[in-house]
């Protein structure tokens, strides 16, 4: 892909960096650890955190914000956990998603749904932990599959 | 000022004995200062001693280091304090007071000859820290064979808990370690040093050692007690004599009353001290409770007899049937001439139960019962026996009763099992034998019929609050009375002594109940009478009685010698420090020992517990964790024939005065275990780069075979993972460690060389930082010639395949493709960190440190710290490699020199020798000294035979053997023998001339012989060590070697060394920052200097630069330097000057200049070449055709003027560098780009700066600026050298096109200005200067130093040094450091009034020389040249190094190397029998 002056916004990276969570993006030195550890990249090579960061740094505002890729992050934080430069890619994805909505690349309801999904997964996690707590005896093995199914069902039906 | 000067101290402290410390010490000592070199470990050498090869020359690290070790170690004015730490530094520049703690080495340095016999004897193996834990070493060790001091040291932690907890102080870890080594006899001897009763204690001791054994925290404690029994039985059975040797009789009598363990031990210790000891025993047999208290199934009588017999063999007389008070009184003893008495009568009387019916028939006292039985008197028990009590006596009585025919035996104990004082094992065995124990049961009344006991009425108890003993007090439960039937009742509730004898001296008792003695010294209130054991303490254990006996013996010894009873004695229980328990030890249960089957037990009194087999004992002993490291088995002490071992060595605090300090403590490697994703510490085949150095090393744990740790198989694929611990702001250090890229390449290349054939190596890296001199070429060769694969990726993680211990490495390629590759081994390239303890010291001393804890420099050069008079060099001032470290060391020496110049030569001493005897025209009289080297030579070669043989050789008038020829007493002897026998040639047959020749030469000089009348035969390294299994052949070879040495010695001639005066002035060529710094350096040390500059003004490249990346203002620096140079009366500046000629040699140069057409000449003793370099003028990227294209330096000049070149700036790096015609990295351009980019953004935050680079080489602490530039918004895009950026100017539009692999974009950028990071190239005339000085340049026309690693500023030609860009591209600050280093080195020459010349040098036989000049071509030192007038070669002996290449190559045989003449060598060869 060719890239020329007309397509780039050199202030894009500053804008991302100015938002909460995006502040460390510029320190990226492109080592690629974020990508090597990413569970999404493992199934979809198109999804490449390092490339997304680089495109932000290069100022490819439209390309980045309009891309479906920014919605694929599972917020597992593996990238950030291993980043030697403390780039918080998961947070950056949040920033990019917000900006995508703000600039009209997606409908706000899409972000809302994504946030609901995130919230739901948080709840699943919390419910899983809570449901494990009473039977914490070490010898007991937990059937996670059954537990998960139960939790998801209960959340699905009894949603506030 | 004058007063100040007087107070300065002409000595320096150097902290850290690595390569920096050694270099600084040598430079300082060689320029007239006394040096204290403090090193924490047992040897100087530092990290470099542990490296295999060094880049970029692949020299063996140890081979190039070793000569420096010897030079530094043997230097008269360097005092090496190893095993020492600096505690504090106080004072100011010129006068510091330094407090040093000399930690114990446990080996006397003045006696140790380094023979290694102690190491062979040591049974303790621990992880070898020198090998980074990959191999093992002994507790007594020398870190590496070339170590200096060439002496061993012992590693001790706190003493092992087993040893500490033994009341008798038996070295338990010691004998366990010896058993592990199969040294059973030595083990018994060790026990017997503290306890004469190993076989007895090995059976009945309550073994507190096992209770405290740390192994018990992992699984089971070591069976220490049973092991002791095993060795004693084993050796006694074999009739091996383990008796110690008593001192000669003193003729002084001592009485011991009581032959129990306390009395016996006291008698034993005193007998060993030479006293005449008589033991008085009331009973008909000796042994006290051992004999009459403990039943034979537990302690057979023959065992007791054997150990008492051994005590009697020492001369102790035991008089049985002689009771104190009955047969003899204290006053009798005094009257009979006994000068002291130890009363240890024990406690043989049973306490009364104090209940109704106690006196009924059938109620027995436990001790009486056991005594009668043991004395084999008729003892009867009924069918049903009740035993009251829970101690060992109760158990012994119960089990004995069973053996005497009782059908049922019941023990009644008033507390619960947990409180039972009896040995747990005994209780278990009793229960196994069918004895019932009723707990919480106390006797209330004896039920008797007609005065005959029929049973007991008992009460149930419960446990209440703890009592004074800490155990819960039993209380009766009301109304719980019940009865137990039994016809024999044995009471065993405690014993008291029979003190009826004390009527004559009631004051020695405590109200008649116990004996009263001082708990520490055991003295009673009657002078000369001591008391101990059960009679004092109440019933206790055997080993406590032994301890009391020992204590009494020591007190009696002191008493009789009239010494203080307390002085220097430790009475308190030693502090127990549990410390860490090693987690990595596999669980392994205690080895079970056999016991007599139950069926065979009760029919008699046969011993129940049976010994280990030897194999079981060794296996059990092998479970020991070696808690104390040194086990204090004392075998080293026995093995050392030089008596150098001092186990009681203690730390010594020492205060010294110095005028200046150089800190060079080095670094510590980053520990990668917290970075769990790489699996270090978890997967065996993940090693650090330092461990891999040892794996590569021929002297390493695998002897240079590249194998992986898990299965010792040769790997086929190895991955190197870079930046472990570096460039990581989160979990490690943010900076770049500077050296890892290069050492990884080196290790890869060497590994490939070691594993011939197929070894694939991949290096995973982010930026390849091959920024040093000739590094890039090395990188290219690794890739192109050696086939090392380089993958640009940071590794995400490493996972092990458990089936084969292979490792899967996960990473992303630059194009985004995720990948996992499998390797056999992974090497983690770990970074550097400042050492925690030196950081501590630096803070204490008040040095300013940066955020990473590196020392902050107060000047442009790295060596100055915030405290005047304290300097730093090496990795404590930031991560760096060896040459820079060495450079800084010399620079620090120069800095110290400028502080202490007035005190030069005030603290140093020079060796004075007697006048040399004239041996010319005298018949050779050769003395031959053949060394045993402990058992190193003597254990293989039959030394006496060599001596006999030597006596038969021609001209040998004297020959002898020595245990250690190098020991101080032998040196004195050699001197006396030279005198006595008029010897005029000396031959020593021993070890290596490398370490020992200078010592022997010095000795014969002290005896008035010329040092060259000495010859050495290496019959150790080259004979006994390599032929250790063929003593006969080795002896023959040793004879041959001696014959050869003697044949040569007969032809040795005295060689003269003469003095050549030195002109104490210097010349510096080049007036840039390096040259000006060098000139000022000389002047500061008080030496006149000529500064020669080609241009019309001083300043060089500094004139073109504005500031450093770190912020140093170069304009200010320039004016300061120029000012100082111009105003210093010792500096003579010639600008506009060309050099026409430089003649002469070290110390005596003569230079002629042409200064603006006028000839000037002067003389000087040293030269510093600082001719500089310049920026390459690019031909690429429209440079010169479009004025918007400029170099980084041009940009810097514009920025300094405040003129921004535009808003959109694109920088292109590596212009002219790393290209086929210039295959080197210019080192400074990346930093300069970062600096300029930051400046642009600081001036205009809306600017867009893009840097196109190949590798960002912001090495070391510069990495932080690279990050700052990214943070500021600079965009960095890597380009490939195969796809360089394209710069175009079309219609006034300047564009740069580049492919960005990360985004996959072909980016086209508009630029207002394109900035080129242009290469640094040497000055055009560098070759001409090189020719004038006859020094070499490399392929890139940079000056080539003598050795890139260890002589970075020297040339092979003495007296000529190099600094700055003339040497290689570098920053201003690095140039300045190097200039200081050149001064530091040059001052070692010009500080001397004269230099010595001659000795082993070449000389020309003029009438044979044809003047062909071949020698002149060959000599790398420029020591030989053909005289154009005489047409013959002439040697400048002050320059000649005696390498002999000229002599070997002279076709006319006109050159002779003195000391190695043809005649001498042929005589050596002829002496070999064919």
Image (cartoon, coloured by chain):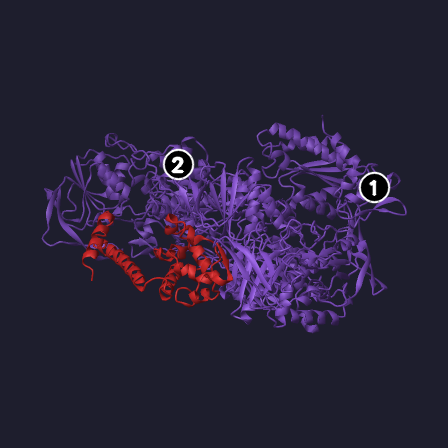
Chain colours: A red, B purple
Helix, strand or loop at mark 2 = helix
Q: Position of residue B1381 (x, y in %)?
A: 67, 59
| Dot placed on the residue nearer the N-terminal end, 2 or 1 | 2
Q: Position of residue B1072 (x, y in %)?
A: 71, 64
Compute the Cα span from label 2 to label 1: 67 Å
Q: Position of residue B654 (x, y in %)?
A: 57, 60
The chain to which mark 2 is attached is B
Checking the image for residue B602, the label placed there is none
In the displayed structure, B303 sits above or below B1323; it is above
Q: Residue at x 73, y 59 (%)?
A: B1171
Assess disc 1: are there few (<14), some (14-19) or many (≥20) residues with their C-alpha within 10 Å of its C-alpha: few
Checking the image for residue B619, the label placed there is 2
Looking at the image, can residue B328 be seen?
Answer: no
Say which of B1040 and B242 sits in front: B1040
Say which of B1030 and B306 sits in front: B1030
B210 displayed left or right of B390: right
Write down the residue under mark 1.
B920
Say which of B437 and B548 sits in front: B437
């Amino acid at each position: 892909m060719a890239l020329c002056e007309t397509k780039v916004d050199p202030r894009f990276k500053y804008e991302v960096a100015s938002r909460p969570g995006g502040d460390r993006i510029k320190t990226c030195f492109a080592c690629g650890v974020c990508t090597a550890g990413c569970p999404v990249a493992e199934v979809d090579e198109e999804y490449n955190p390092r490339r997304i960061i680089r495109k932000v740094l290069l100022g490819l505002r439209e390309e980045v914000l309009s891309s479906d890729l920014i919605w694929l992050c599972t917020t597992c934080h593996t990238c950030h956990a291993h980043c030697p430069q403390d780039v918080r890619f998961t947070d950056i994805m949040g920033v990019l998603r917000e900006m995508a909505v703000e600039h009209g690349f997606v409908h706000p309801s899409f972000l809302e749904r994504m946030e609901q999904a995130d919230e739901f997964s948080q709840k699943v996690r919390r419910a899983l932990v809570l449901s494990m707590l009473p039977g914490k005896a070490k010898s007991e093995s937990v059937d996670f599959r059954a537990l998960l199914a139960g939790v998801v069902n209960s959340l699905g039906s009894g949603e506030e | 000022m004058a007063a100040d000067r007087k107070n300065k101290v002409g000595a320096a402290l150097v902290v850290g004995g690595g390569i920096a410390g050694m270099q600084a010490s040598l430079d300082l000592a060689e320029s007239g200062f006394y040096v204290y070199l403090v090193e924490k470990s047992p040897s100087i050498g530092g990290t470099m001693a542990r490296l295999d090869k060094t880049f970029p020359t692949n020299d063996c690290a140890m081979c190039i280091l070793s000569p420096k070790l010897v030079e530094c170690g043997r230097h008269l004015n360097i005092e090496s304090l190893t095993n020492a730490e600096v505690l504090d530094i106080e004072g100011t520049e010129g006068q510091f007071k330094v407090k040093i703690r000399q930690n114990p080495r446990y080996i006397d340095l003045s006696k140790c000859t380094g023979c290694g016999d102690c190491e062979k004897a040591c049974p303790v193996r621990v992880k070898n820290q020198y090998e980074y834990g990959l191999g093992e070493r002994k507790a007594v060790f020398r870190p590496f064979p070339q170590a200096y001091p060439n002496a061993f040291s012992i590693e001790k932690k706190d003493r092992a808990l087993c040893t500490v907890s033994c009341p008798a102080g038996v070295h338990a870890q010691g004998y366990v370690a010896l058993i592990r080594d199969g040294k059973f006899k030595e083990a018994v001897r060790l026990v017997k040093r503290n306890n004469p009763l190993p076989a007895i204690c090995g059976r009945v001791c309550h073994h507190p050692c096992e209770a405290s054994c740390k192994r018990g925290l992992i699984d089971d404690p070591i069976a220490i007690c049973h092991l002791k029994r095993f060795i004693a039985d084993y050796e006694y059975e074999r009739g091996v004599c383990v008796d110690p040797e008593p001192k000669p009789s003193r003729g002084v009598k001592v009485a011991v009353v009581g032959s129990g363990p306390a009395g016996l031990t006291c008698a034993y210790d005193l007998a060993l001290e030479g006293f005449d000891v008589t033991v008085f025993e009331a009973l008909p047999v000796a042994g006290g409770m051992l004999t009459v208290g403990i039943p034979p199934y537990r302690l057979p009588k023959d065992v007791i007899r054997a150990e008492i017999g051994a005590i009697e063999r020492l001369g102790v007389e035991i008089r049985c049937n002689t009771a104190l008070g009955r047969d003899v009184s204290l006053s009798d003893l005094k009257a009979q001439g006994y000068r002291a008495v130890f009363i240890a009568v024990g406690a043989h009387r049973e306490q009364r139960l104090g209940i109704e019916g106690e006196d009924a028939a059938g109620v027995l006292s436990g001790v009486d019962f056991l005594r009668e039985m043991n004395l084999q008197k008729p003892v009867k028990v009924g069918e049903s026996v009740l035993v009251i009590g829970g101690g060992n006596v109760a158990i012994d009585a119960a089990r004995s009763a069973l053996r005497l025919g009782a059908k049922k035996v019941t023990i009644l104990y008033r507390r619960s099992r947990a409180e039972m004082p009896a040995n747990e094992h005994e209780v278990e065995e009793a229960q196994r034998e069918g004895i019932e124990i009723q707990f919480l049961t106390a006797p209330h009344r004896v039920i008797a019929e007609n005065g005959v006991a029929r049973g007991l009425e008992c009460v149930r108890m419960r446990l209440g609050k703890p009592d004074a003993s800490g155990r819960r007090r039993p209380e009766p439960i009301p109304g719980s009375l019940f009865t137990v039937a039994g016809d024999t009742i044995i009471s065993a509730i405690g014993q008291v002594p029979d003190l009826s004898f004390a009527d004559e001296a009631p004051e020695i008792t405590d109200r008649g109940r116990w004996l009263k003695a001082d708990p520490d010294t055991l003295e009673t209130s009657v002078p000369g009478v001591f008391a101990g054991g059960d009679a004092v303490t109440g019933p206790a254990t055997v080993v406590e009685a032994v301890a009391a006996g020992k204590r009494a013996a020591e007190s009696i010894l002191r008493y009789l010698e009239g010494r203080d009873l307390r002085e220097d004695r430790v009475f308190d229980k030693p502090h127990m420090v549990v410390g860490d328990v090693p987690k990595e030890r596999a669980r392994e249960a205690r080895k079970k020992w056999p016991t007599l089957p139950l069926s065979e037990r009760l029919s008699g009194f046969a011993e129940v517990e049976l010994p280990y087999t030897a194999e079981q004992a060794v296996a059990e002993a092998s479970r020991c964790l070696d808690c104390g490291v040194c086990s204090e088995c004392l075998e080293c002490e026995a093995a050392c024939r030089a008596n150098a071992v001092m186990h009681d060595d203690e730390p010594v605090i020492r205060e010294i005065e110095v005028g200046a300090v150089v800190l060079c403590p080095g670094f510590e490697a980053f520990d990668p275990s917290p970075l769990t994703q790489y699996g270090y510490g978890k997967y065996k085949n993940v090693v650090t780069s330092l461990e891999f150095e040892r794996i590569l090393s021929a002297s390493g744990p695998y002897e240079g075979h590249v194998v992986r740790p898990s299965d010792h198989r040769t790997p086929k694929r190895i991955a190197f993972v870079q930046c472990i611990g570096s460039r990581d702001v989160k979990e490690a250090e943010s900076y770049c460690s500077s050296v890892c890229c290069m050492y990884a390449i080196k290790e890869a290349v060497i590994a490939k060389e070691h594993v011939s054939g197929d070894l694939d190596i991949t290096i995973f890296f982010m930026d390849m930082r091959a920024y040093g001199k000739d590094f890039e070429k090395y990188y290219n060769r690794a890739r192109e010639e050696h086939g090392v694969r380089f993958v640009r990726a940071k590794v995400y993680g490493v996972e092990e395949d458990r089936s084969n211990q292979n490792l899967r490495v996960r990473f992303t390629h630059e194009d985004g493709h995720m990948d996992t590759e499998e390797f056999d081994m992974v090497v983690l390239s770990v970074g550097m960190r400042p050492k925690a303890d030196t950081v501590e010291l630096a803070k204490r001393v008040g040095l300013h440190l940066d955020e990473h804890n590196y020392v902050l420099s107060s000047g442009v050069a790295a060596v100055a710290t915030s405290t005047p008079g304290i300097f730093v060099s090496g990795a404590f001032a930031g991560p760096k490699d060896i040459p820079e470290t060495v450079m800084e060391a010399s620079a620090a020496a120069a800095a110290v020199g400028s502080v202490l110049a007035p005190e030069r030569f005030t603290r140093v001493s020079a060796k004075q020798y007697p006048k040399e005897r004239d041996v010319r025209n005298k018949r050779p009289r050769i003395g031959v000294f053949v060394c045993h080297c402990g058992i190193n030579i003597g254990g293989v070669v039959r030394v006496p035979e060599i001596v006999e043989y030597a006596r038969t050789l021609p001209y040998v008038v004297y020959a002898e053997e020595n245990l250690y020829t190098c020991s101080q007493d032998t040196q004195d002897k050699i001197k006396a023998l030279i005198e006595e026998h008029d010897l005029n040639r000396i031959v020593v047959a021993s070890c290596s001339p490398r370490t020992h020749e200078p010592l022997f030469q010095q000795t014969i000089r002290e005896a008035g012989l010329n040092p060259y009348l000495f010859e050495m035969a290496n019959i150790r390294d080259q004979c006994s060590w390599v032929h250790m299994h063929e003593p006969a052949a080795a002896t023959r070879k040793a004879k041959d070697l001696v014959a050869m040495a003697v044949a040569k010695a007969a032809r040795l001639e005295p060689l003269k060394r003469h003095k050549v005066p030195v002109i104490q002035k210097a010349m510096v060529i080049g007036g840039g920052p390096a040259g000006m710094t060098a000139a000022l350096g000389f002047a500061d040390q008080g030496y006149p200097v000529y500064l020669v500059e080609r241009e019309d003004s001083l300043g060089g490249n500094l004139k073109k630069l504005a500031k450093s990346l770190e912020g140093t203002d170069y304009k200010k620096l320039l004016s300061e330097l120029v000012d100082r140079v111009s105003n210093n009366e010792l500096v003579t500046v010639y600008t506009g000057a060309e050099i026409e000629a430089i003649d002469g040699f070290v110390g005596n140069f003569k230079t002629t200049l042409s200064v603006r057409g006028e000839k000037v000449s002067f003389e000087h003793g040293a030269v510093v070449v600082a001719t500089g370099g310049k920026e390459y003028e690019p031909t690429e990227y429209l440079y010169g055709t479009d004025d918007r294209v400029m170099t980084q330096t041009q940009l810097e000049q514009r920025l300094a003027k405040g003129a921004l070149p535009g808003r959109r700036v694109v920088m292109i790096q590596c212009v002219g560098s790393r290209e086929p015609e210039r295959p080197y990295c210019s080192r400074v351009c990346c930093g300069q780009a970062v600096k300029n980019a930051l400046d642009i953004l600081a001036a205009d935050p809306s600017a867009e700066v893009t840097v196109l680079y190949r590798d960002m080489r912001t090495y070391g602490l510069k990495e932080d600026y690279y990050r700052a530039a990214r943070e500021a918004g600079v965009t960095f895009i890597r380009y490939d050298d195969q796809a360089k950026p394209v710069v175009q100017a079309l219609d006034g539009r300047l564009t740069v096109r580049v492919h960005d692999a990360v985004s996959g974009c072909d980016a086209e950028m508009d630029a207002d200005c394109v900035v080129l990071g242009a290469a640094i190239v040497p000055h055009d005339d560098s070759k001409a200067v090189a020719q004038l000085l006859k020094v070499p340049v490399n392929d890139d026309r940079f000056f080539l130093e003598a050795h890139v690693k260890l002589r970075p500023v020297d040339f092979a030609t003495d007296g000529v040094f190099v600094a700055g860009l003339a040497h290689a591209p570098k920053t201003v600050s690095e140039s300045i450091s190097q200039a200081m280093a050149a001064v530091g080195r040059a001052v070692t020459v010009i500080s001397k009034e004269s230099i010595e010349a001659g000795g082993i040098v070449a000389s020309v036989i003029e009438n044979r020389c044809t003047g062909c000049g071949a020698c002149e071509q060959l000599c790398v030192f420029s020591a030989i040249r053909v005289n154009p007038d005489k047409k013959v070669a002439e040697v400048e002996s002050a320059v000649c190094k005696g390498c002999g290449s000229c002599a070997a190559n002279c076709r006319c045989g006109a050159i002779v190397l003195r000391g190695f003449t043809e005649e001498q060598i042929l005589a050596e060869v002829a002496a070999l029998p064919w």
